[in-house]
Amino acid sequence: MAVYTHLGAEQLAELIAQYDVGTLLSAKGIAEGVSNSNWLIETTGNNGAGARFILTMYERRIELGDLPYFLGLLDHLSNRGCPVPRTIHDRTGASFHMHDGKALALIEFLPGVSPTRPEPDQALSVGATLARMHLASDGFALSRANTMGFADNLALLEKCGEAGLASIHKDLPAMLAPARSAARLDLSSLPQAQIHADLFPDNVLMLGSQVTGLIDFYFACTGAMALDLATTHAAWGFDPASNSYREDCGSAIIRGYESVRPLTDAERALLPEIAKGATLRFVASRAEDWLDTPDDALVTRKDPMQFVSRWRFYDEFGAQVFA
């Protein structure tokens, strides 16, 4: 259950009363997510027709100073017609406020479900929506550095150490060498935008093949659009059960993206290496989480070797995939 802080009915009612959204009717903790406490909020709404929102309390992995960027980006993209949840500002105009030392924000609820095994038409729509989001982010006044860049991935793997990595899987220490190579890859000359940087299927809401919501922007940053595309390709282009590459979904991501924003020659040439670097991010973060999670914790560890396999695929076939 991703509710780390208990808020009683009276506290929740007082918090919701700070917003012009009607009276609180119900609040239900949301199990999904691992970093923050989340509640599904139902209120009477302004016109009495009822309304739904997501209330988030930021517990970990979020720097308070980053919230204006995250929440402001949602508002910027929503105002430009992107399917992202807008931030609900309180009666003072603030996008978030503090409660017992923790930040809280109320976010628009969007309909839809996250696909568990994406189909090609869904991947096509996601690619196109990602490109529209990149273009719509133009003019956003704030910026944020990527804290999960290629050099950061290397630092995480080195922190785990060869012995620690080997304790997870005997082949894992071998990923230190490609991580060192990826850390030298410079993407600063490629076209830049505000990027989601974590667009896995569970961060996309859909009704059929229509994208109704891009959510969880808490890794968003200013960076190369090609990195966002490569990360999305690595997340959507492989079967979740067998981990084998699905050419139908992988090519659909690229086609959908380029139907809105064609790639430059420089982006296309670097995509195989960028995709390898993108997979290393999840190798590194999963390895760190694996080693930091106690054996008796009620948490299912995510296997970093899943993304080692995807790195190997891009290393062998990336030039063909992105040709």
Image (spheres, grey):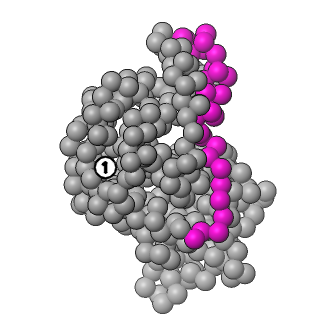
Q: Quadrant of the C terminus?
A: top left
Q: Looking at the image, is 174 positioned above or below residue 19?
A: above
Amino acid beneath label 1: Ile
The local secondary structure at tag 1 comes to helix
In the displayed structure, does residue 262 sit left or right of residue 23?
left
Residue positioned most to the bottom: 47
x, y percent for residue 62? 67, 50
Q: Nearer the viewer, residue 12 or 302?
A: 302
Residue 254 drawn above or below residue 179 = below
Q: Is residue 165 magenta?
A: yes
Residue 297 in the image, given as x and y percentages of width and height? 57, 28
Nearest to the observer: residue 52 or residue 65: 65
Disc 1 crowd rating (10 Å Cα; few below 14, some 14-19, many 20+) is: many
Which residue has dot 1 on it? Answer: 254
Kindly indicate the quadrant of the structure image that contains residue 261.
Answer: bottom left
The x and y percentages for residue 302 are 47, 30
Q: From where the camera sits, is residue 208 visible?
A: yes
Dominant secondary structure (helix, strand or loop) of the stretch shown in magenta:
helix
Instruction: Compare residues 97 and 172 and report the one nearer the observer.
Output: 172
Name the one closer to the observer, 2 or 238: 238
Q: Residue 210 lies in what quarter of the image?
A: bottom left
Residue at 64 percent across and 43 percent down: it is: 147
Q: Residue furthest right?
A: 101
Could you say where residue 48 lies in the image, as x and y percent from the top left?
A: 47, 87
Q: Is residue 276 left or right of residue 15?
A: left
Decide if residue 180 is on the left or right side of residue 32: right
* For residue 145, above or below residue 128: above
Residue range (magenta): 139-167
Determine the residue positioned at 40% across, 52% down.
Answer: 264
